[in-house]
Structures are given as C-alpha cells and as structure tokens.
Amino acid sequence: MQKDFTVTSGQARLAGVEANGEEALRPTVVFLHAGVADKRMWQQQLTAFAPSHRVVAYDRRGFGETRGKAETYSHVDDLLALLDQLGINTAVLVGCSQGARIAIDFALTHPERAAGLFLVAPAVTGAPSPEAFPPAVEALLEMLEEAEEDEDLDRINLLEAWMWLDGPNSEEGRVGGAVRDLFLSMNAAALYAPDPGSETNPAAFPPAYARLAELDLPAQVIWGDGDFPHLQQRCVHLVQALPRALGTVIPGTAHLPSLEQPEVFNRHLKSFLDGL
C-alpha cells in the first residue's frame, strides 16, 4: 500500500510517496523524476516494484506538491536529507533526465549511500552542449524560444510535450491519451510553480562529466531512439565512461520511455535489480 510523506530540507517540505510489500526485503529504490515531470511519472514503477522492494518517489523543489520558501539549495543535499529522515542507508537511484543528473552527483558526493544507478536519458553536470541541431530540431527550439520570450506558459507546455514526450523529430501528438494528459499536468505544475530559489551543486567542481570513471558501482543507461540526437550520443558516452555500465535502447520512445513503454522499461529495471 502506498503512503504519502513529507520530509524537511532547509525551508522546503519535500512531498513524496513510498510503498513496500511483505516481501520487500531487497534494496530500497528511489526514483528521481525528469525536469518536465514530477513523482507521478513513476506510478507504474511504484506499483510494479513495491512487492519486492521498498520504493520511494518524491517531488523536487519547484515540482509537484513540494513547497518551500525561495532560498539557495542543493538537490543533492535534499536527497541526502530524504534518505536520512526515511532511515534509508543505501539505495538504488533511478533517475530520468535531470533526475539522473542529481543521482550521478549524489553518487559522486556520497558514494557509500548509492547501491546502483539506473539512468534514463541522463543529463550530466558539465556535459558539453551541441554546437548545432538538425533543422527540424532547430525550428522547434526557435518556437520554444519565442514562447518563452512571450511568457506564454501554456504554449511552452505544449511545445515541451512535443520535444520531450513525442520527440523532436516526431510529429506533434505522436503520444496521446492518458500519457499526454499526465505529461501536460506534471509540466504545468512546474511551469506555474513559485520560484524555489537558486540551486547550488556540491559535486560540480570538477563537474561530473569529467568524473564518470569514479562511479565504480552497477549502472545501466536507458534511452529512446526518438530522443534528441545529442542526448543519445551522451548516453553512448556514459556507457563507455562508467566502469560498470550497460546500455539499452528502447525503440519507438523519446525522452520518457518509462511513460511510453512501462512494461518494457520495467523488464529492464527488474533485470538490473535482480543482478545486484
């Protein structure tokens, strides 16, 4: 049975959900959402893995139901506070996009607390930006820039659904139904959320991109073949740079494969967890 919780870090009250069944004797799994989502993106995984693991998902500052005063903060410190207050000594970190960035930075800062990394289309602190984009992607980015200049949050939400859910080289609306509705709800909550303050990163110097070889723990990198080309290239680099990493492509998905193909995603995650 799932239950809601809140933990305190600085001036923030982090909202989360956790669950575990009677047979949940294996490592705790903590899910970190993408920057266009919140903890709701992991509902399919929470349901699937609660019988065998203690599972935890939470909203970071500026997302979902988490609330707090604007201040300088660290997502790494927030995650540490969450683990401490929930009594979790070590955890497998499952992170998507910006959530994966935080998982990587946390594992570099507190290696004794991370039992494994399952990284989905990961952002990485210090990763180089592409010098150019394909024409179709460039056109979409220009539309997003115009919407941002106009401060048209509803338009931004629709364009970000195209970019991150459908994929930048796909037709708008490729992914529909309940999944699209969920994306738009999660991202709208973030777009309209009060400013949480400014993030500081204790693991940023030197940045994680230059320190991947230090992450000597089980890892798997997952990505969709419809994601941004430079992000797919980054995933390939991580598989090569992380000492103990596997790489897996989920065909027919973009930046959020756990939402698009949860059953396929869950099979890969189960295999990873079973191998620990």
Image (cartoon, rainbow, N blue to C red):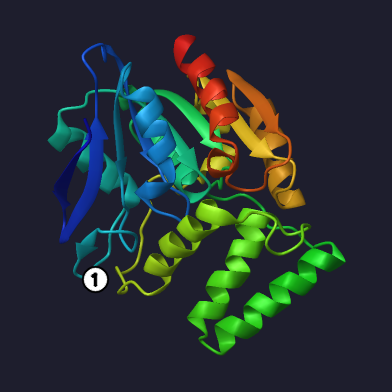
Tell me residue 121's x, y (percent): 60, 42
Mark 1 Cα within 10 Å, few/some/many (few <14, many 20+)? some
- Residue that mark 1 sits on: 70
Q: Please tell me which residue lies in front, 140 or 214.
A: 140
Q: Is residue 210 above or below residue 155?
A: above
> What quarter of the picture does the N terminus occupy?
top left
Helix, strand or loop at mark 1: loop
Residue 116 seen: yes
Please name the amino acid that badge 1 sits on.
Ala
Determine whether 263 is above or below 143 in the image. above
Point 62% across, 48% down: residue = 255
**How many numbered discs?**
1
For the point 30% across and 74% down, which residue is it?
194
Q: Tell me if I can see residue 102 in this picture.
A: no
Nearer-the-camera pick, 84 or 203: 84
On the image, the x and y values in percent for residue 177 come to 56, 55
Determine which quarter of the picture holds residue 187.
bottom left
Q: Is residue 92 left or right of residue 179?
A: left
Position in image of residue 130 (x %, y %): 74, 58
Locate residue 97 relative to residue 159 in the image: left or right.
left
